[in-house]
């Protein structure tokens, strides 16, 4: 069984910074794409940033230049460094990973971590 566990969400003032972390564990043979999505109240879940196993990244236009995604393949972790946070970044942030467990591929999600940007 595969688990993704996020950490790092909290209340922060506008202009502040946060670092989210996500660790994958369980029956993992290989991890391919990893990323972060977010869902604000009353809105659909949206892509924030993704990163391939080779390190290629993709960002939502709304976070380009402010957020940085990174991963450690050996530790099976993916992080999201968030700078210059805005109130509109308030959401539940979800970690995502596409994982091969030796028998089949699957998309896995964490339980979510709350980020609130407010003064």
Image (cartoon, helix red, strand yellow):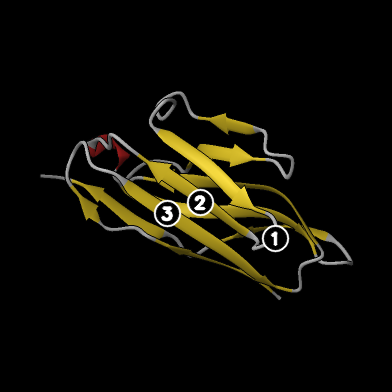
Seen from the viewer's position, the closer of residues 66 and 74 is 74
**Front one among 47 and 76:** 76
Q: Which mark is residue 79?
A: 2
- Label annotation for residue 102: none
The quarter of the picture where residue 90 lies is top left
Q: Is residue 75 above or below residue 48?
A: below
* Residue shown at the point (28%, 34%) measured from the top left: 84
Identify the element where label 2 is drawn: strand
Find out whether the residues at labels 1 and 3 contact each other: C-beta distance under 8 Å.
no
Q: Residue at x 21, y 50 (%)?
A: 12
The residue located at (49%, 45%) in the rendering is: 37
- Quarter of the image holding residue 52? top right
Instruction: Tell me whether circle 3 and circle 2 mark residues in contact (CB < 8 Å).
Output: yes
| Residue 41 visible, this angle | no
Decide if residue 39 is on the left or right side of residue 51.
left
Mark nearer the N terminus (1 vs 3): 3
Q: What residue did someone put label 3 on?
A: 20
Q: Position of residue 72 (x, y in %)?
A: 63, 54
Q: Residues within 10 Å of mark 1 (few under 14, many from 20)?
A: few
> Residue at 73% of width from left, 45% of height from top?
53
- Between the residue at mark 1 and the residue at mark 2, the CA separation in whole angstroms equals 14 Å
**Left/right of residue 103 with respect to residue 5 in the rendered view:** right
SS assignment at label 3: strand
The residues bearing labels 1 and 3 have C-alpha atoms spaced at a distance of 18 Å
Q: Earlier in the sequence, mark 3 or mark 2?
A: 3
Query: Label 1's element?
Result: loop
Q: Residue 74's mark?
A: 1
- Label 1 vs label 2, nearer the camera: 1
Q: Is residue 114 visible?
A: yes
Q: Position of residue 3 (x, y in %)?
A: 61, 70
Q: Where is residue 96? Give x, y as percent.
A: 59, 53
Q: Is residue 61 above or below residue 1?
A: above
């Amino acid at each position: 069984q595969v688990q993704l566990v996020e950490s790092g969400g909290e209340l922060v003032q506008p202009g502040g910074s946060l670092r989210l972390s996500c660790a994958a564990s369980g029956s993992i043979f290989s991890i391919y794409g990893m990323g972060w999505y977010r869902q604000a109240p009353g809105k659909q879940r949206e892509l924030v940033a993704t990163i391939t196993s080779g390190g290629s990244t993709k960002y939502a236009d709304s976070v380009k230049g402010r957020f940085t995604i990174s991963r450690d393949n050996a530790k099976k972790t993916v992080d999201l460094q968030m700078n210059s946070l805005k109130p509109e970044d308030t959401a539940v942030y979800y970690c995502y990973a596409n994982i091969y467990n030796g028998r089949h591929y699957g998309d896995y999600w964490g339980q979510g971590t709350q980020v609130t940007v407010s003064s």
